[in-house]
Image: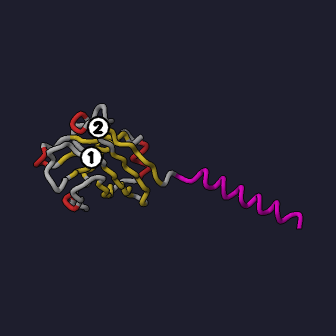
Amino acid sequence: MNGIPWLALVVALGWISGCATRPEQSVDIPLLATMNNAGTIAQASLTSAGNETTISFVVGGVPSGTTLPVHLYTYVYPGSCQQLGPKPAYAMNQTVGADTLSRRPPWQFWRRVPVALSELRAGDYALVIRSGPMDGNLDLFCGDLR
């Protein structure tokens, strides 16, 4: 009888320590508004999906005068928000049409990028949300993925 509580404690501690060493499964990244979209907020939640990463977005606003329904395009760039690479490493605009977004914020949508979360977090990458061509292809939000 006296051994059972200790056994439960050992099993519980093993479970807790196992949780502490598990690879990162998800992470929230605040997306900072650019000068083109000052005063608005957004966030991305990245979730591991094996060799891919699912990114869920919540966008709180776009510049006034943006064409409705809102069209938002998403990219992963090499570099940082301070210095984006010359072209995107991943354009995530083929799976979910941004024209399905409602007319009022907050807008919620998701994309999938064909690279593991651990690789995105280990490299120098930035996540960019851009307006559609009809609205000038303006960078609206950016967040460093480190």
Q: Callout 1: helix, strand or loop?
A: loop
Please state which of residues 33 and 73 is positioned toward the viewer in this rendering: 33
From the top left corner, tell me how far across and down residue 129 is, in percent: 26, 46
From the top left corner, tell me how far across and down residue 105 is, in percent: 28, 52
Residue at 14% x, 45% y: name it: 65
Residue at 28% x, 41% y: name it: 141
Point out the residue furthest to the right here.
2
Residue 94 seen in the figure: no
Number of residues whose C-alpha sits closer than 10 Å to that of mark 2, classed few (under 14), some (14–19) or many (20 or more):
few
Q: How is the image coloured?
A: secondary structure
Residue at 24% x, 41% y: name it: 140
The label on residue 39 is 2
Q: Which residue is mark 1?
A: 61
**Quadrant that contains the N terminus:** bottom right
Amino acid type shown at disc 1: Gly
**Quadrant that contains the C terminus:** top left
Point out the residue furthest to the bottom here.
1
